[in-house]
Image: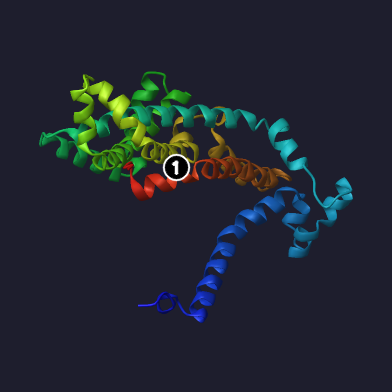
Amino acid sequence: MSSRALRPSRPLVILASAFILVWILCAAFPFIWTIWGSFKLEADFFSYGGWKDALLGPHTLAFSGHSYTFQNYRDLWIDQQFWRPAINSVIVTVTVTVISLTFGTLGGYALARSTSRYAFWILIAALIFRAMPGLSLISGYLFPFFKLNLWGRLPTAAIVLVALNQPFTLWLLHSFFLTVPRDLDEAALVDGCSRFQAFRLAIMPVMWPGVVTTGIFSFLVGYSDYVVCTLLLPESNQTMVPATAAFLGSEQHAGKLMFAVAATVSMIVPLLILILAFQRRIVDGLTAGAVKG
């Protein structure tokens, strides 16, 4: 069969390309529009005069002499001290990612190499725990946290997020370890390595795509959480997502709505940079597991 016969027809290519283009525009438009609006005044972006004010920014032009302004970001990060929730988010996110990856990597490897029948039931128990709504689990934590004076602390929220995220991390890394040939372990043991040395020197170098992929998901759990941080942290010690939601709940106060717009952009941009920086590792981890050569 000739290669020409295998090629899709031109109308089909045009139709598929148009569909993909429309899909990308629809998916990207809310974010692009939010970025655009973050450089406008509230009188323009939420104008009753129509979308032209949001596009051209007449009030912004009169205020700053330009069609854009950084006033929203200045007020957000300096006057509203949004840097405090940002630092809290970094602390919680890094803690969740490091702990989840450490225990998930060790546990996933042990379960993947175990021949005991209990390994299967441990994974099933983790799956059942993961299937439970997070809110139903958090309610059980509240009373002991209050009694032990642990409520309102960042490590408390981080540990609860680890508990909610660990089953998923365990399952994902267990699946990656299953794709790594046992021959690597056996060869390392024959060369005189201990089991942990075989894990560290022979297995982990080929597991990095899977570890990075799992780490990204763990990062997103801590970074974008709303329920856990809202219930376990006070307003004065919040992370970025609950702090942004608080601005959305203050619509009656002039300017507060634009704080939410600027905060949303401030939260999403680091995620885009992270995904772009690790896109190759993520694709390798999702498509090829951890097998190399």
User: For this view, does 290 lie left or right of residue 194?
Assistant: right
Q: Where does residue 192 sit, x and y in percent of width and height?
A: 21, 19
Q: Residue 7 or 285: which is nearer the viewer? A: 7
Q: Amino acid at mark 1?
A: Arg
Confirm whether residue 67 shows in the render: yes
So how many labels did they put on this image?
Answer: 1
Q: Quadrant of residue 85?
A: top right
Residue at mark 1 = 281
For the residue pair 268 and 190, the one nearer the viewer reads as 190
Q: Is residue 88 above or below residue 52?
A: above
- Residue, x 30% and y 41% (percent of image)? 176
The residue shown at (43%, 48%) is 283
- Classify 10 Å Cα crowding around label 1: few (below 14), some (14-19), many (20 and above): some
Residue 183: horizontal and vertical position, in percent?
20, 35
277 w.r.t. 141: above or below = below
Query: Quick check: can you spot residue 152?
Result: no
**Quadrant where the N terminus lies?**
bottom left
The x and y percentages for residue 167 are 29, 38
Please provide percent x and percent y for residue 262.
67, 44
Q: Residue at 51% of width from left, 79% of height from top?
A: 10
Q: Residue furthest front?
A: 2
**Left of 125 or right of it: where is 40?**
right
- Secondary structure of the residue carrying tag 1 is helix
Q: Residue furthest left?
A: 117
Assign the C terminus to one quadrant of the image.
top left
Residue nearest the viewer, comparing 7 with 1: 1
Q: How is the image coloured?
A: rainbow
Is 67 left or right of 215, judged from the image as shown? right
